Image: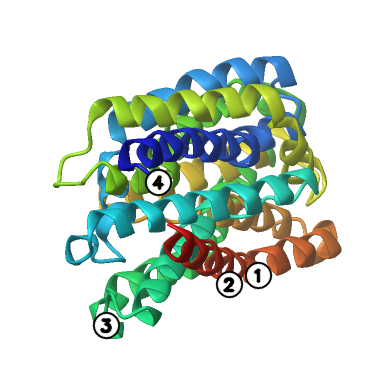
């Protein structure tokens, strides 16, 4: 197949992945505002689309670098193989995210694409195009550790923020008056979260596209714009499915609880983006929501929903990797 045809196909599939990110990960930025009723679904779609796009277009560069060449040493491969591998990774991640969104599961799109890119690397090793040592296991280890640390940090920070609000405000003044103020503060933190999410998760679509374009260390601005537009459209068309799960089904959210969860998540995600780390915003937010839920006692957290979400997290990386290995092998064999 001609290289230019493959590149065009990869651009289309990359847009599909960006759409999936918006559809599934919109919950990360706005679900708590929906659960607490600080914003309506229509308002969420408008605000999230604008801010996710802005974060993706102007602050998505560093994490895109990590996804593009931080795991698989694409500079050691023939460019045709890089195109096949990145295309297979995009297709695998996109398919898995679509399936998960259909079942209302807030999976990690970061897990999906990192697992898919790892599958590409392993497939290249199995065919003798790379050695096992050439895969950047140190970078992969840091990424995986960040997935464990981020929900714990989000939970701890959200718990701390809410407890400060509880003792400093809720127990001293009317609940009602404090919650009224935090309704507006939660809208601000939702905007903060949407911007942070766009800056980190756009790389899940743009990283492989950058690799296909012959990545040389600088991400073309149009690639980030492309990813940001895809995310915005995904939010507008299918984002409501996962918003329901995270916003209403894990724990009961008030304005103060929603503010605490969003503030903790956005702070964690922006910190990671500044270091180029593709953390899971899904893990971070779910951890934060659980954290504020635990402030009201273990019984206030829906453990069945949490178990279902965690199971989907565990299977994401191996499923995405396995799908990529299969697709990449078929592309190379039948090319």
Q: Crowding at label 4, few (<14), some or many (≥20) Cα neighbours within 10 Å?
A: few
Q: Quadrant of the C terminus?
A: bottom left
Per the image, label 4 sits on a secondary structure element best described as: loop
Whether residue 174 appears in this view of the structure is no
Q: Crowding at label 1, few (<14), some or many (≥20) Cα neighbours within 10 Å?
A: few
The answer to which of 225 and 323 lies nearer the viewer is 323
Q: Pointer 2: what residue?
A: 318
Q: Residue 104: give x, y in percent of width and height.
A: 78, 46
Q: Crowding at label 3, few (<14), some or many (≥20) Cα neighbours within 10 Å?
A: few
Is 171 located above or below residue 180 in the figure? below
The circle on residue 1 is 4
Marks 2 and 4, the one that precedes in the sequence: 4
Residue shown at 64% from the left, 20% from the top: 45
Q: Pointer 1: what residue?
A: 315
The answer to which of 286 and 7 lies nearer the viewer is 7
Q: Residue 182: give x, y in percent of width and height.
A: 62, 27
How far is mark 2 from mark 1, CA to CA? 6 Å
Q: Is residue 111 left or right of residue 310?
A: left
Q: Crowding at label 2, few (<14), some or many (≥20) Cα neighbours within 10 Å?
A: some
Question: Looking at the image, do the residues carrying marks 1 and 3 touch, with CB atoms under 8 Å apart?
Answer: no
Q: Pointer 3: what residue?
A: 131
Q: Residue 53: give x, y in percent of width and height.
A: 44, 24
How far is mark 4 from mark 3, CA to CA? 26 Å
Per the image, label 2 sits on a secondary structure element best described as: helix
How far is mark 1 from mark 3, CA to CA? 26 Å
Per the image, label 1 sits on a secondary structure element best described as: helix
Residue shown at 32% from the left, 36% from the top: 4
Per the image, label 3 sits on a secondary structure element best described as: loop
Residue shown at 46% from the left, 39% from the top: 14
């Amino acid at each position: 197949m001609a290289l230019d045809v493959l590149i065009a196909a990869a651009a289309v599939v990359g847009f599909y992945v960006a759409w999936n990110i918006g559809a599934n990960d919109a919950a990360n930025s706005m679900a708590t505002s929906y659960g607490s009723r600080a914003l309506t679904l229509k308002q969420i779609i408008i605000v999230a689309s604008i801010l996710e796009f802005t974060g993706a277009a102007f602050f998505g560069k560093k994490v895109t670098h990590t996804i593009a060449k931080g795991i698989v040493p694409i500079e050691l491969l023939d460019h045709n193989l890089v195109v096949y591998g990145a295309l297979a990774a995009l297709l695998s991640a996109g398919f898995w995210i679509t399936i998960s969104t259909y079942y209302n599961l807030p999976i990690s799109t970061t897990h999906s694409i990192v697992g898919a890119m790892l599958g590409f690397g392993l497939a290249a090793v199995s065919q003798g195009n790379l050695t096992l040592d050439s895969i950047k296991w140190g970078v992969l280890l840091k990424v995986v550790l960040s997935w464990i640390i981020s929900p714990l940090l989000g939970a701890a920070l959200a718990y701390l923020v809410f407890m400060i609000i509880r003792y400093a405000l809720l127990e001293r003044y009317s609940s009602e008056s404090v919650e009224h103020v935090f309704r507006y503060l939660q809208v601000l933190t939702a905007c903060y979260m949407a911007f942070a999410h766009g800056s980190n998760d756009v790389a899940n679509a743009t990283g492989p596209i950058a690799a296909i374009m012959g990545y040389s260390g600088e991400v073309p601005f149009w690639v980030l714009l492309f990813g940001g537009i895809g995310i915005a459209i995904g939010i507008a068309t299918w984002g409501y499915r996962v918003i329901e799960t995270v916003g209403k089904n894990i724990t009961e959210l008030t304005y103060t609880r929603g503010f605490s969860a969003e503030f903790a998540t956005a702070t964690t995600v922006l910190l990671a983006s500044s270091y180029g780390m593709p953390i899971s915003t899904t893990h971070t937010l779910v951890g934060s929501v659980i954290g504020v839920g635990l402030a009201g006692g273990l019984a206030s957290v829906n453990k069945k929903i949490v178990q279902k979400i965690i199971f989907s997290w565990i299977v994401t990386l191996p499923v995405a990797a396995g799908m990529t290995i299969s697709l990449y092998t078929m592309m190379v064999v039948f090319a």
